[in-house]
Amino acid sequence: MHTKTLAELKTGLTNGEFSSVELTQHFLDRIKNLDSKYNCFISVTEEAALAQARQCDEHLAAGDAPVLCGLPIAHKDIFCTEGIRTSCGSRMLDNFVPPYNAGVVDKIAKAGMVVLGKTNMDEFAMGSSNETSYYGPVKNPWHTDCVPGGSSGGSAAAVAACLSPVATATDTGGSIRQPAALCGITGLKPTYGRVSRWGMIAFASSLDQGGPMARTAEDAAMLLNVMAGLDSRDSTSTEHEVPDYTATLNQGIAGLTIGIPTEYFDEGLNPATEQAVRNALSELEKQGARLKEITLPHSHLSVPAYYVIAPAEASANLSRFDGARYGYRCKDPVDLHDMYMRSRAEAFGDEVKRRILVGAYCLSAGYYDAYYNKAMQVRRLIKNDFESAFSEVDVIAGPTCPNPAFEFGAKGDNPVAMYLEDIYTIAANLAGLPAMSLPCGFVDQKPVGLQLIGQYFDEARMLNISHRYQLATDWHCQSPSDVS
Amino acid sequence: MSIDRTDIEKLGELARIAVTEENIEATTRSINEVLALVDQLQSANTANVKPLANPLDATQRLRHDQISESNHRDDFQPLAPATENGLYLVPKVID
Amino acid sequence: MTWETVIGLEVHTQLATQTKIFSGASTEFGAEPNTQACAIDLAMPGTLPVLNEEALRMAVMFGLAIDADIGKISAFERKNYFYPDLPKGYQTTQLEKPIVLGGHVDIELADGSTKTIRIHHAHLEEDAGKSLHEDFHGMSGIDLNRAGTPLIEIVSEPDMSNADEAVAFAKKLHAIVTSLEICDGIMAHGSMRFDVNVSVRQLGDELGTRTETKNLNSFRFMEKAIKKEVERQIDLIEDGGSVRQETRLYDGDTDIARSMRSKEEANDYRYFPCPDLLPIEIDQAYIDAIKASLPELPEARHQRFMEQYQLSSYDAGVLGDDAATAQYFETTADQCDDAKLAANWVSGELAAKLNSEDMPIQQSPVSAEQLAALITRISDKTISNKMAREVFDAIWQGEGEPDAIIEARGLKQVSNSGAIEVMVDEVIANSAKQVDNYRNADVAKRPKMLGYFVGQIMTASKGQANPQQVNKILLSKLNALL
């Protein structure tokens, strides 16, 4: 049952092949049996899930079921869930049970989905390997010695190991696409503003965007259908109309122009990864798409710009974690200053502290212009690069990551080596463009991702191309050994 | 630009994060690695480029001035480390 | 040595919106602690701000009222610092692109001349919560009801040169914002709070080092604080010392000022554009529409009160500067049809009583309607002024409506001339000797002799006869005997 796609499970539920309770119990059993090996979940909400599934079965029987009624899902632990601990992977929020839901959680609940639990992640979404989680790293289901990617590593590994058919995730610099690539699944970061950020614990507000993780483009489209749309509680959420992303999946791709940025095939790219990506591009060409070499001349500045902007925003966003109103407070503070200093030092991990300090530095008097303002200017140059590229092409394609999954500890204690794993994903966040990753092959039995970057609000086109690709290939159908 | 341990202490103070003696060296070193990375920005020619704060260049939507929130103190205060008589308690504030 | 004082003000003005600047929680004053602090105000994780359109509109109204430019694009920034009354660890405020730019406020000086105080800018921002310092086992209590209340911070140029000018400026601002009805102006609630920047220099010298005295919430305290600070600075310099740039606190009750310890560390607020809020775009049509609907401003009202109600310039100022007082006065005057009497009562008896109880006019136990009814009874001679004061006190004590009180206390003045004539006749008949004396007295002395007769008549009427009528009838009857 767990190897079925979301679309197939929906059909099964509708046709009465199994009930939502059976389906939910099946996934809960898998989590119980296998998650000790992967550490995908921070919290499993068994009772609530089964209660919800029972209700869904009633709706399915009554014929008044909402669109994704009874289908299981897991939420990244960055989305606030009413009555369910929401830790954001941090000791700071280990005891935090929000009395409200994230906008995305509400929308998914309204669509009738059953929440299995909350998935592990890098602390406050800061990381590319899931090694910064307070709850321990997630293991890559393909190779348990390797990282699943980050920060949405728990969601990616849960979907890859079929512990949940789909999951929510967030992407600030690649946190959906990179783990999707490393775990061999399909993940989509929508256009900035497409999905509500309300109740999604902020890392870098101008870059953060929630999106779906699934095994197929079709499933991602089904989930995005219910995640996307205006939320009046988020000022940056857009009024742009939400199309039915499943409606255009089957369209032919003949005649489309796909831009191949020279800069994404540089010397940093693993040759075997490059080969897999080139093969995927050939497949698209075979289906009638035209490949066109393009250039994004400021690409090399995206990582430096990101590591000013994201830490700067984070340094302010994380100031609210001060031990006063919720979350961790150090033992016996001698005074107010001590409460702040020790609560934050004790409850934040090294990477979070590092980014807060870097952010404070980039914004501090005398450095604002050289760092923050400069980065915001470079951000516009990067956006301009994309805009001129999109005057010639319909979509941009390239690798999601330079390398397949690496082993735990491989990046040592040099943060920059880790940061460079996001070299191809960060630019889409800076420009606010939609982008996705889909499986396109293996290197050393480790999955490789093809990245598509679309025009603003053109998620449907990327999903269409991905779906056509998945109709012709079976990379997305491969599963790690535990699945069968 | 590179920074030394005094700078780190100052930043720790600004960000209210205690940096202990045992990890100040490592912190200084790793932050300098990050700063070396971001220093690549200085190579960009940004003359007359308007900073981009929001990727969509969108403008602010407004909210009607209508009360939409009711009292949920009893839901929020159990989350706090210390409360009394409806107040959040923190170590004494000295102006 | 001749010293010159340079004063600039930063005025935090709470906007009279129903809800917070970035959340839908109520801004009403005086609620139980933290009952009006919603998830956004508490900075719960994942919560986001959305701007209140009314706060924006009110800020634009203020800008237009002081002849300022309105920022067509304005933006919010984050000002980063840690304090328990600041839940997010940053204040959402405006720095680079404020909503109101420039403008001026004109004040009248003691010598009758006018001085223009330039406004540097005014910006929108959120208020902080409150730290309650009474002891909770060595802890402080934090109430975040006020957190997120919309403010405009009005920043003047350093154009004032003494405490009187600063107070006049502050009062004029109060008059403007209350007239616009964008602030309730209730100082006791902290609706307007003043930060005062003061420096001194010897005439002709460069600007001296300034200090900032924060959070003064009454005109009187502001005046005292400025005078004290000027004196302190001059003493310091004359004793060979120098003024240190610092933030100071002034306690109006003890008249003690001191340096603020928590502000001593060098602050680096790390301002940057708030990524959760987008730039606000305002078009000319929006500005024009607000301009067209601006209510009457204090200066115009002052003029109108002089013309419409025949008030002196002084009275027009006393009654017209504060919007709530003006409204109270106009309601009273219009309903009792005696503007002069209404003016006397509102600026006299009522103002004194409110002042002694430290009560804003909005909360007056005697409504404008009740005062008008009372004044009507004075004008129609039902009661005397003296009785009216008694009735006023009774209304204040909540004893009911004026007519009912007059009735219940038997205060009705006898104005029936027939009844008075009977009493006058009786007194004249019983006072043959006094009538003779009157008749034989020198004409110039006669008026002084009336007192006896009036006294007798008032006694006979138990004080209820209308004195003017008594005088009139008595005079005509006595003169008829000459």
Image (cartoon, helix red, strand yellow):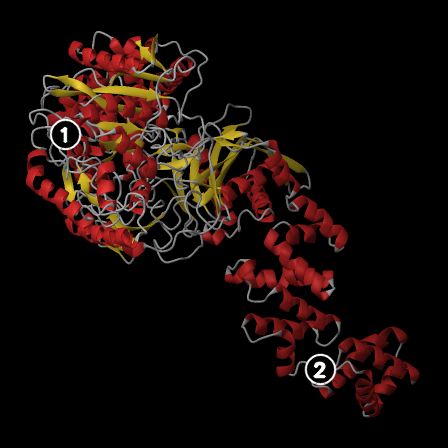
Q: In this rendering, would C396 be left or right of A400?
A: right
Q: Is residue C80 above or below residue C480?
A: above
Instruction: Count up the numbered dots.
Output: 2
Q: Quadrant of residue A118?
A: top left
Q: Quadrant of residue C335?
A: bottom right
Q: Does the residue at mark 1 contact the one at mark 2 (Cβ under 8 Å)?
A: no
Q: Which mark is residue C464?
A: 2
Q: Position of residue A2 (x, y in %)?
A: 15, 38
Q: In the picture, which quadrant includes the N terminus of chain A?
A: top left
Q: Between residues A373 and C475, which one lies in front from this camera angle? A: A373
Q: Position of residue A97 (x, y in %)?
A: 22, 47
Residue identifier under label 1: B20
Residues indicated by labels 1 and 2 sit on the same polypeptide chain: no
Badge 2 marks a residue whose secondary structure is loop
Q: Residue at x 63, y 74 (%)?
A: C402
Q: Residues within 10 Å of mark 2 (few under 14, many from 20)?
A: many
Tag 1: amino acid: Thr
Numbered disc in front, either 1 or 2: 1
Q: In this rendering, would C456 be left or right of A484?
A: right
Q: Residues within 10 Å of mark 1 (few under 14, many from 20)?
A: few
Q: Between residues B91 and A54, which one lies in front from this camera angle? A: A54
Q: CA distance from mark 1 to mark 2?
A: 87 Å
Q: Position of residue A66 (x, y in %)?
A: 32, 47
Tag 2: amino acid: Gln
Q: In the picture, which quadrant includes the C terminus of chain A?
A: top left
Tell me if I can see residue C411 in this picture: yes
Q: Give the letter of the chain under mark 2.
A: C
Tell me if I can see residue A363 in this picture: no
Q: Residue at x 79, y 75 (%)?
A: C468
